[in-house]
Image: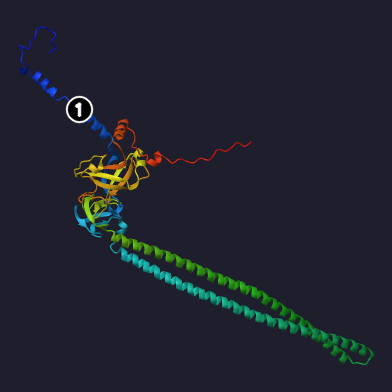
Amino acid sequence: MLNISENSINNYIKKKDFKVFKVLEDAKSFQFSKKTFMIISIVFLAAMFLPWTQNIQTDGYVTTRSPEQRPQSIQSVISGRLERWYVKEGDFVQKGDTLVFISDAKSEYFDPNLLERTEEQLNAKTQSADSYELKVDALRSQYQAVKEALDFKLRQLDNKILQAKNKVEMDSMDLVAFKTNFSIAENQLKRTTELHAKGLKSLTELQEKELKVQETRAKVSVQQNKLTNQRNELLNLDLQISSTEREYKDKLAKVQSDIQSALSSKLGTFADASKLRNQLRNYTERRERYFITAPQSGYITKTVTKGLGEMIKEGTDIMTIVPERYDLAVEVYVRPRDLPLVQQNEKVRLRFDGWPAIVISGWPEASTGIFSGKVVAMDRFISNNGYYRLLVTPDPEERKWPERLSIGTGARAFLLLNDVPLWYEVWRQLNGFPTDYYSEEKANPKSIKLKAPLKSVK
């Protein structure tokens, strides 16, 4: 009590009868001594200088590193009607096993003999192309024959021209002879006329000379006309050569045009045959697409399309398959400010959902029940969620990840960074500063040698 009054009640009240006094007496027994407080303070201060491993904590999930090892959807290349299921959810299938059978839903593929009929059209087009090939050969032979006929005709005309030139020369010589005879006959007539006037020649002889002059004049006229006709014939032969060349050139051009038309038809037939061949191949491949097969060995986990008779469009998901074998990895996301701290092959500690673990993030060697990994891939572009994605794979130097670990399992990742004192980490966390990622080389850069200053030029 405070003992501020001379009248004391200690003799009248027993402290053991009141719980309050008992509690006060018990509280005095828990008071620390100065020695104990000093020991605790020293231990605490010493602990502040213990090494602490800085880390980045983030969540993620189990996935696979290779794209072909991830769960994938099985789709139909063509549209059709679902006719039969060959598997159910949970079944294990080998690569190439039949999963679903569909029938065609387009009217242009309803004909059951579509392949045979298309093949018949292809054979007909091929034979037509062969016929055009024979026609081209025949026209080329005809072109050669016309060309040879032109050469023969020109040689024949050349011979005729040569003969006509010879005749012209002969007629010219005959004309000269006839003109000479005519001149002689006129001289004889003149002398006979003079002699007849003197009475030395008879009238009969005079008349004979006159008749001979008339005959020689007629022969000269006839020979002159004959020479003119021969020259005209030679000119006609020259004109006939030009006409023959034009005529045969027209024939050759027509044959050449027929050859080009036949070649064009042949190439068109080849193009049609190629289209039919392509169409036949497409029909064959389409028939094979009626049976949808497994792209790889794995487990059927989910069927999207359910009932028989449903229409399936091309590219529509039918079911999901999980590969039989896969290499596990963990996909995690880090903040943009933490990305510069992460390097390739960075050590990572992982805690998986369903596997109990005691994690001390700053002392990874004291953590139990966790697994190790390393960073193998980092995105260079930010994701839609505002973070950068990292891919972590098992560390071959550490213990293996659990065998029953499944794709999609949640994981907690601790990316290990620099070792700093514990007091520094507490101070950093209280102030919200980023992790210290400055290395010694960055903190203490080598001194740079500077050149001596230039002296001023006077």
Residue 83 quadrant: bottom left
Left or right of 419 on screen, residue 137: right
Give the camera-side residue of 184 and 125.
Answer: 125
Indicate left or right for 201 with 329 as reference. right
Q: Residue at x 29, y 64 (%)?
A: 113
**Amino acid bearing label 1:** Lys
Nearest to the observer: residue 220 or residue 56: 56
Scheme of colours in the image: rainbow
Picture coordinates of residue 313, whole percent (x, y)? 29, 51
Q: Quadrant of the C terminus?
A: top right
Residue 98 point in image, percent of width and height? 23, 59
User: Is residue 52 at all visible to an observer of this figure?
Assistant: yes
Q: Nearer the viewer, residue 378 or 347?
A: 347
Vertical relation: 9 (above or below) 433: above
Q: Which residue is mark 1?
A: 35
Residue lying furthest front: 35
Question: In x, y percent, where is residue 146?
Answer: 56, 76
Say above or below: 144 vs 32. below
Residue lying at 24% horizontally and 43% vertically, measured from the top left: 365
Query: Which picture quadrant has residue 25?
Result: top left
Residue drawn 85% across and 89% down?
209
